[in-house]
Image (spheres, rainbow, N blue to C red):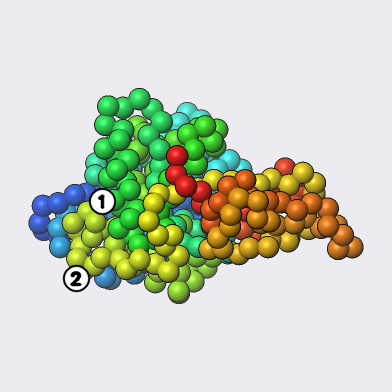
Amino acid sequence: MLSSRSAPAVPVITLQSGLPGPRVLITAGVHGDECVGVGVIFSLLELLKTELRAGLVFLAPSLNPEGLRRGTRCLPGDERDLNRLFPGDSRGGLADRHAAAVWEELRDRRPDALIDLHTDSCASIPYALVDRCVRPRADANLIEERAWALAEGSGFTALAEYPPDLYRRYQLDRSLTGAMMNLLGVPTVTLECGPRRLLDPAAVEEATVATLGALTALGLCRRPAPRHPSHLGPGRFRRDAGPRCAAAGVLRPLLGPGGRFAAGDALAEIRGLEGQRVERLRAAESGVVIALPERGWVEEGAVVATVALPAR
Ligand SMILES: [Zn+2]
């Protein structure tokens, strides 16, 4: 007899400790070309057999299996960012429908927390991102504080997401973590680690340690993460866009990932093809370079670096 239960939208593996505790969802690969998280989940499958002390863990190694197969960020056949479409729409386009199916699959696990694994650029420091509760909720502050505890538990540099105006403009409340936080009140963290496109062994190791640290902050493990060398120290920071260039040209960064700068310091310059300097881009306030664009040529208006600035 045929089962009436339809096939799952994406693979989800359940690990039970046998003791009461939070239900934690760990997801990877919503951007199909970001592979480090897939490797982290494979490592966790082994490690959590002995490390899981309490609660329940749901592991979703790939939220975009077709993107993983083809090495594409988006769902093949739909150029929109899947991670801006949650909770999805079962009557919409290809990516809306996939987002809806994934959302249902994950929401039905009734998670108490979500750790979503991503990678930024090949030139970036690892960091832990905390979403913003931008919809009116009485418990908004409490949820954000729980999310900060997860981020700080990872040992990575913890950053608040873009300021609320940019957060909304970039539709980050419709990312998986943003939607889980804003619609369901789930504390979430995004770990950004490693280069894309391969299961880089060093990045997989770093992000696995960070994930175990976040699980430890929730009481599921006893493996606190040491502070990663990229950690920025005391005080809270936010992710923000660095300066934008006024002209197209060759992007020559002057400061690498982790580089600190003061207001007025030059972060990058734009040069013409014969080497002539077209523009020099300076920081408006002091901060740290988080990531550089993966390109040698930029068009007018491009952001020349992602930066961490004091939180607001
Ligand atoms: Zn991503």
Residue reaching furthest bottom? 201
- For the residue pair 237 and 61, the one nearer the viewer reads as 237
Looking at the image, which residue is at 61% across and 50% down?
A: 263
Q: How many numbered marks have been drawn onto this rendered protein structure?
A: 2
Vertical placement of 65 versus 3: above or below?
A: below
Amino acid type, residue under disc 1 in the picture: Val
Residue reaching furthest right? 274
Tags 2 and 1 touching, CB below 8 Å: no
Position in image of residue 132 (x %, y %):
40, 38
Secondary element type, mark 1 = strand
- For the residue pair 125 and 24, the one nearer the viewer reads as 125
Determine which residue is flagged by label 1. 24
Looking at the image, which residue is at 58% across and 57% down?
A: 261
Position in image of residue 123 (x %, y %):
58, 64
Q: Could you say which quadrant of the image residue 57 lies in?
A: bottom left
Position in image of residue 184 (x %, y %):
30, 34
